[in-house]
Every structure is written in C-alpha cells, then in structure tokens.
Amino acid sequence: MNYLLRIFGYVRPYTTIAGGVIATIVILAGTNLLPAWVQKLIIDGLTRHTQLRALLGLAAFYFLVVAVNAGLNALQANLVQVLGQHIIEDLRNEIFRAIQRQGMPFFDRYETGQLMSRVTSDVNLIQLFVNSTLVNLIGSILTPFFALIILFRLDVALTLWVLLTIPPIVVLQSRLARIRLIWREIQRRVGDMNVVLQESLVAIKLVKAFNRLKAEAERFNASNWQIRQERLWAQRQSIILGQLQNLCTNLGMVIVLTVGAQQVIVHAISLGTLVAFQRYISLLFLPFQRVAAINQTTQMAMVAAERVFEVLDAPIAVQDPQPPVAPSPQRGEVVFEHVTFGYVAGRPVLHDISLKIPAGETLAIIGASGSGKSSLVHLVPRFYDPQKGRVLIDDHNVREYPLKDLRRCIGMVMQETFLFNLSIRDNIRYGRPDASNEEVERAARIADAYRFITEDLPEGFDTIIGEKGVRLSGGQRQRLAIARAICTDPLILILDEATSSVDTRTDAAIQRALRNVLRDRTTIVIAHRLSTVQQAHQIVMLHRGQIVARGTHEELLQTSREYRLLNDLQSSRTDLADAAIAQLMAMLEDGANRHVPELVVRQ
C-alpha cells in the first residue's frame, strides 16, 4: 500500500484538478445521502395522508437531487480522467528517464523485456487504478461515515445489530489482501513473457534460419499458459471471497428487514424509517462491496506500483560528481592506472591494467575473444567504473567529469552496430543533431559510405533505413556507424571492431580515409585484423584480462612469438582472400560466364 500512496506525490503539480476531484467527492458524499431521506419523507407522508401538493414537491426535490448527483458524477469522472492521464504521463516519463540514467550494471541485471513490461503494462495497471478505483475508494470512506451517523440517529439498537456482520467481512478482506502475492508473481511472469516475445522478434531471422518457429511458439505458449493458470486461480479466490462478503452484507439486510419489520408492526419506527434504514445500510456496506469488486484491480496495481518504484528507487552505479570538479577534456590523453574490473564482485575480467595513451596517438588492442578488450574501453566513457585503480583523461579521474561532458568528447563505434529507424542523415548526426548537411556528407565520405548512399538508396541521405537498419547490409550498417562517430568530431575515438563486417577491400578504403581523421586525435582501436592496427603508435595484446605484450608492430614482431605467429597466419590468409576477391571482381566486371577459379574454391 505504501507504493500506491507514493502515487499521490505525482498529484502535486495538478492541485487545482485534484481540488476539483476532492470537492466533488465531498459534495457527492453528502448528496448521495439525500435520496434515501427524501424517500423516507414521501413514504411517511403517504402513510400519514400528507397533502398531494407536498408529496409532489418532495418528488420534484428527489428528481433534482438525482439530477445534481448525475451532473457531479459526470464532472468527477472527467476530472479524474484528466488527473489520471497527467499522473501516468509523468510516471511513465520518470521511469523512462530513470532507466536512461542507470549505468550499464543495471542493464546487466534486468532483461529488456522486464523493463519494457514495467514501463508499459505495469504503468497501465496503475492508470486503471487511478482512473477507475481510487476515487471509488475515497468516496467509499466518506459516504459510509456519514451514513453511519444517520443510522445511529434513526435507531441505535438496529444499527448495533447490523454492525455484528462487520467482523467477518473484515476477516474476508484480510484474506483478499493475501492474493496480492500471487499477483506479484503474475506480473513477474508477464515480464518473462515479454522477454520471450522480445527475443523472438529481435532474432526472427535466426529463429527462421534454424527452424525454431515451433520451439519459440512453444516457449511463448508455456509462459502464456502459466500466466493464465495463475490468473484463474487468483480470480477464483477473489470471486469466492467476494461472494462470501456479499453474503455477509446480505445477512445485514436480512437483520434489518426482520428486526425492523417487527418494530414497524409495534409502531416503534415508521415504514419510511425502515426503507431509509435499508438504503443507508447499503451505503454503509458500500466500501466492502466495492473493495470486493475492485480487489483484483487494486491488488494488481499494488504489485505494479511495487515493480515500478523498484526501478525508480534502484541505486545508480555510475553517477555525475556532485559538484563536478574537472573542466571538459581538452587534449585527450588517456591513462589507465592499475585498473582491475569485473562485472561480478570477486570475478575480475581485467587485472591490474596500466596504460598510457598520449594525446593524439593511436592505441591498438588485440587479443582473443573474451580477453577483456571491450571491457577495457568501456571504462573510458564510464559505462562501468573499475573496482580498483583509476582511468584518467588529461590528468583528471573520469569520475570527476560530468558524464555529459565526458561522453561528448568521445566517439564510439560499437562491436554491435545499432541504427535507428530514421533517415540516413539523422542516423549519421545522431550524436550531433546540429551538424550541417555538408558535415554529414563529409563523415559519410570518410567512412566510405557516400557512394552506396547516393547511388544505391532511392532517396539518398533521406532514405528511412528501417528498424535497426534492416534494409542495409552488415557492411553498410557498420560504415554508417563509423560515419556517425566521425560526425561528432570527438576528441577521443574508440573503434571496437569497427570494420569487422566489411570485406578486405572496403576495410582498406576505410583505413586510408581514417588516416586523416585519426591524425592528432587520440584513438583506441580494437581489431582482429593486424592490417588494421599496424600503423598504431602502440599495440597491446591482452590475454585473460592481462597485458602479455606491448609495443609497435615492428617491435612486437621481434619480441612476441604470439604476435609474430598471428601476423604470419593472417598475412597468408589475407593474400589468399585478396586474390580470390580480385578474381571474383574481375569476373563480375567483365560479365564473364566462367567457373569460379580453383583458388576461390579452396578458400
């Protein structure tokens, strides 16, 4: 319940609307009591042979009260919808911003589908509670309170008889509250189902390629079936307990009719009083009847609020310094001082790394998959913070820079290329929205992307590329990612397998174009192809999170047996690959209808 109470904090910016809602609740709490009293007066008037004119006046007043109540209910419903939409919009925006502020350890812990479930379905459940349940609950407190006062005013003894049915109703309410545990599990399973859905859609090509459509459907069906079973159980319990509660309230009505009828017979109370008493008993039991009806919504909203605030309250692993103590980087010197880092406590993937990259120079990092190359460069923009040691830029710990300033001076080409469903132009200037068209085209030329953009795409730079760039080849997507990084004109450029998805010829073209860009710019290059890193000022080889060799290309050929073997192996394979590609290109350009050369077949 504490989580639902926190929702009220989002009402503060909309006090005028909230004031209107509260005013209608209070007014309706009073006007809802009038019809029963007017009915009492009319019935007592009939039994006492009151003049017709007076009875007609009471009937007109009764109609007026009902009309006023209808108008107030309509006004209240409209105000509640407006207030609810504002609250949910703010809540959804806040949880999205909270997710964006989180460091990468947060995303290692939460699956994407679970986070999507909290922003969408969990917030929708809170919206349902705010719009349709909250006002009913508040109104159900005020109206019964006033009704109880009138009941004691009408007949104290009869009211006490009715109150005997309240304790069993309270017990049933406590049993209903326990169902919240199962709704928490249901919401978790809904998140798991979203994970299955998200993975199946993202990897749809892989699913089809491996004929796993049936298996994925079965996985989704299993998750969906479990949700259905648990929902049915929770709803069944709610229905049973709700009906038992209704039975108790109806028992109260039976007591009123039985005891009250005897009092009418002996003229202890009037018939009108008995009818009014019955109406007020209905208003007294209103909160219990409504809670039984809306229990499911309330329980689901409580669980949803708990899940939403779990994300909002999650500690941020990587935060801005308060206050920032370092100016924006100006030179671009990067230093790793005895850095140890691991994604899980006690299991480091980097061990005591010390490196210095002078401003304007290029560091190349090579090593087998899993050796810690990407983990090392992710410490520079503070995707993660090391457990031991420091990362410095221009003699300042990166923790001293505002994150916005730090990341503004760093351009990255990730190992996994991601493009947005925007135009080519907007994707290239994503990191620098104010870049001119000329700067965008220049970045495309440097990345060897200008030709395919202008010649192969129907609308050139204005072509919408589809979700994740689905309309482009892997090499084209990677060249756009390089252009995007170049367009930001970064002080420090990080290329994490930036040309892994392009062929050897395109790789060579991009490397030639990048030479001008990399000049006087601090660059960290991760690559498997040694041809990509031979011109680096310094090459570092990692193995299991440790530096096992460092130096220039020529120095490592002399001092490192592993580097020399790797160079010899890649050189021989590259010669074969280049020869095969040259022969294939010649065939395509000449339009010759010939068999593939034997060299290509062997390759």
Image (cartoon, helix red, strand yellow):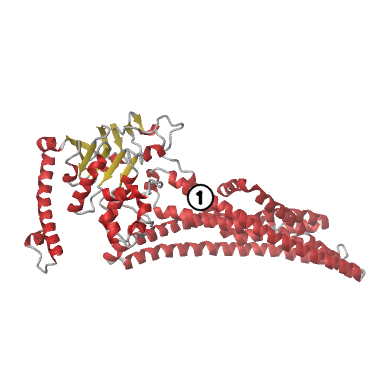
Residue depicted at 58% across the width and 56% down the height: 129
Give left or right: position of 270 versus 480: right
Question: In terms of depth relative to the viewer, which is nearer, 203 or 274?
Answer: 203
Q: Nearer the viewer, residue 302 or 20?
A: 20
Number of callouts: 1
Left/right placement of residue 63 relative to residue 243 reads right
Image quarter of residue 171: bottom right
Percent of width and height locating residue 138? 67, 53
Give the amino acid type for the residue marked by disc 1 in the picture.
Asn
Residue 17 in sight from this viewpoint:
yes
Tell which of 79 and 495 is nearer to you.
Answer: 495
The residue sitting at 20% across, 43% down in the picture is 367
Q: Quadrant of residue 359?
A: top left
Spot occupied by residue 559 in the image (x, y as percentages of width and height) = 11, 35
Q: Residue at x 52, y 61 (%)?
A: 234
Residue topped by disc 1: 93
In the figure, is residue 552 to the left or right of 397?
left
What SS does tag 1 mark? Answer: helix
9 to 298, vertically: above or below: above
Going 28% across and 61% down the picture, which residue do you hit?
456
User: Where 492 sits versus 179, above or below?
Assistant: above
Sort mark 1 into few (<14), some (14-19) or many (20+) by Cα contacts within 10 Å: few
- Image quarter hosting the C terminus: bottom left
* Spot occupied by residue 190 in the image (x, y as percentages of width and height): 45, 58
Q: Place residue 489 in its image quadrant.
A: top left
Q: Viewer-proximal residue, 431 or 69? A: 431
Is any part of residue 175 visible from this angle? no
